[in-house]
Image (spheres, grey):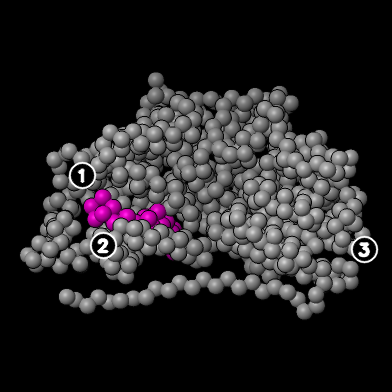
Amino acid sequence: MRTILSGVCALALTASLSMGTAVAGTKIGAIFDLTGGLNIYGIQQNNALQLAVEEINANGGVLGEPIEVISYDAQSELSKYTQFANTAILRDKITALFAGLTSSSREAIRPIVRKANIPYFYSSLYEGGACDKVTFVTGSSASQQMSKLIEWGVSTYGPKIYIMAPDYNFGTISAHWVHEYATRNGGEVVGEDFLPLTVSDYAPTLQKIQAAKPDFVVALPVGANQTGFLEQFAAAGLKDRIGIVSTNYGSGNQQVVVSPQAGKGIIASAGYFMEVANDQNAEFVKKWQAKYGTDTPIVSGAVDVWNAVHLWALAVNKANSSETEAVINALESGLTFDAPNGKVSLDSKSHHLNQNIYIAEGNEDHGFDILVTFTDVPAVFEADKCNLVKDPGLAEHFTPES
Amino acid sequence: MDYFATVLISSLSSASILLIATLGLAVVFGLMGVINLAHGEFIMMGAYSALTATQLGIPFILAIPVAVLVTMIFGALVEIIIIRRLYGRLFDTMLATWGLSLALYQGAVLIFGSVSPGIGMPQINFNVGDYTLAAYPIFMILVAVVMLAGIYVLLTRTVYGMKARAAIQVPDMARAIGIDSARTNTLTFAIGCGLAGFAGAILLPIVPATPSMGFAFVIKAFLTVVIAGPVTLAGSALAAIGVGTGASIVASFMTSVAGDLFFFILTVVLLRLYPLGVSAKWRMKL
């Protein structure tokens, strides 16, 4: 018998999170996906939170003391969100929670923070409809983005729309808003295809699109596989005659993944692009790149967290207290903040942000050129359904009736 | 009519893509009986190898053999370090390769980050009546045929092929007549991994390299090999064309969800009718 070379392969992954400052001040909790499939967003969300806290602390912190951050890695698993939310509240005694990316993570956290009565900030673009006294949403909702994107699309390309969306609530609810705003703007949905997240070959969808002859396609690819759709759409030569618009293209830096040929000309609408030109953004990008480097463009989710932390700090200082009731009252007092994505204001009734919606076109350098800025766009659907000033007991997740 | 023609052509290309992603598994699982749950991650490794090679300035066509070589070497190491100790221990192999897949996935996140620039598809397309089709996916039909023929010749017409099949089917006898079965198995496993790497590289223009890309392929690849049964190569080809084309046609006329449903339901029905795979009664070698 031959002796077999024996090898030991040890892979030690140690994730150490430095946390805690010398002086104990007001404690906030942060739970984001630092590892696992969703860390494409989670790392930037966490980076933004650290950066915001650093800036606030450098300027005197809140209530005259530095903010202390208790940070957890949710590992892209829902169960970790509930576990760490409980730990952060019961053991660490945080006074506010910043957490979550997916809607399912928000819905897992919401009952916990509601019971504990702790202000909770959810910072990601999402399908819309969350309505809860202690929950504040700083990302843009589907109706907020779609209202402008469809209006722009119909007037730029023409009335006929095809929808390509992922087959779960983000896709189906977004599709509802496409229908709604198509009708309002004199457009018409000529076809739609809801795709499982595991599909990687889009030939059938491309044929259906060609058969329906739309003026433009609303594409909402989620995850790595669906990014391939954009590549295949371009290679089939469809981009020259059919427009392609999206509310989530760029939110996970998809513009870096797709080739320049496929990415050029894709229209994205979002609450933030790194290319936004204003002084706050220039300063924000400079700080970010000094700390985290220039490798990866900043995604909108990071700015949503940045805004959430600043709004919370403004409210605490305004209320001169970190007690929940006082902070929520201050948050509901019509707070505004000069954010990297332009001036934002917190709607006291819906707990959503009125914010700019940008329409941008993908360019050849894996980046965007901003085409149009719609200022101070409200979260249409949430403002309509959700009035937490009048009815503070509401705890709902509204979905549009289709 | 044009619509039907384009559906047929592109469905064949969908089936070919499935077959390309499956053939490595057909060798490792179908031939060797090793359940390699890291198959998808070997595809991912091939994609990243090819991507890195192109970023270093190597033309894409030459990046493909680089990817094959990288995954073959890694596959050989995996066989020597892990798989070799677990032959005949089905569940242990599954657990070990699943662990390997998690480590490779997270390793890719650490090394390449969660987004890498893609290389894009050649912007060549052609018309069938009113419809336009991208040329590169259609080219995959040819690639699948050549790949299938190449593996068939390698395993049936070469001395290595005979040794490989002997070392797996009757290991003791193979050793008795002087075949170094351990080395042969290492090579066979490495070839299976190399095929996965080839798939990742050749499909790179269609499916961009991401750490999680393996998940998309691995389930359907496994089902295809299970449907195929003992006559691995011909069976996999038939299964991929039958189930893959069928699912794609259903997706074209109905919805993509219906296409996926069709794929899985057909798998269940076929396995109910042929519990040992469709090729259980065939009298072919591979």
- Which label sits on residue B87? 2
Count of number-bearing discs: 3
Q: Is residue A223 above or below residue B78?
A: above
Chain letter of disc 3? A
Between tags 2 and 3, which lies in front? 2
Relative to B34, A305 lies left or right? right
Question: Residue B281 location, x and y as percent?
Answer: 17, 38
Q: Residue at x 88, y 43 (%)?
A: A389
- Which residue has dot 3 on it? A320
How many residues crowd mark 1 within 10 Å: few (<14), some (14–19), many (20+)? many
Question: Residue B253 location, x and y as percent?
Answer: 45, 26
Residue type indicated by callout 1: Val
How many residues crowd mark 3 within 10 Å: few (<14), some (14–19), many (20+)? some
Relative to A77, A23 lies left or right? right
Mark 2 to mark 3: distance in Å?
68 Å
- Which residue has dot 1 on it? B231
Q: Residue at x 23, y 52 (%)?
A: B31
Callouts 3 and 1 on one subunit: no
Mark 2 to mark 1: distance in Å?
21 Å
Mark 3 to mark 1: distance in Å?
76 Å
Residue type indicated by callout 3: Asn
Q: Nearer the viewer, residue B243 or B85?
A: B85
Q: Is residue B71 above or below residue B145?
A: below
Residue type indicated by callout 2: Tyr
Q: Is residue A34 above or below residue A248?
A: below
How many residues crowd mark 2 within 10 Å: few (<14), some (14–19), many (20+)? few
Q: Where are the magenta residues, as a range? A: B29-56
Chain letter of disc 2? B
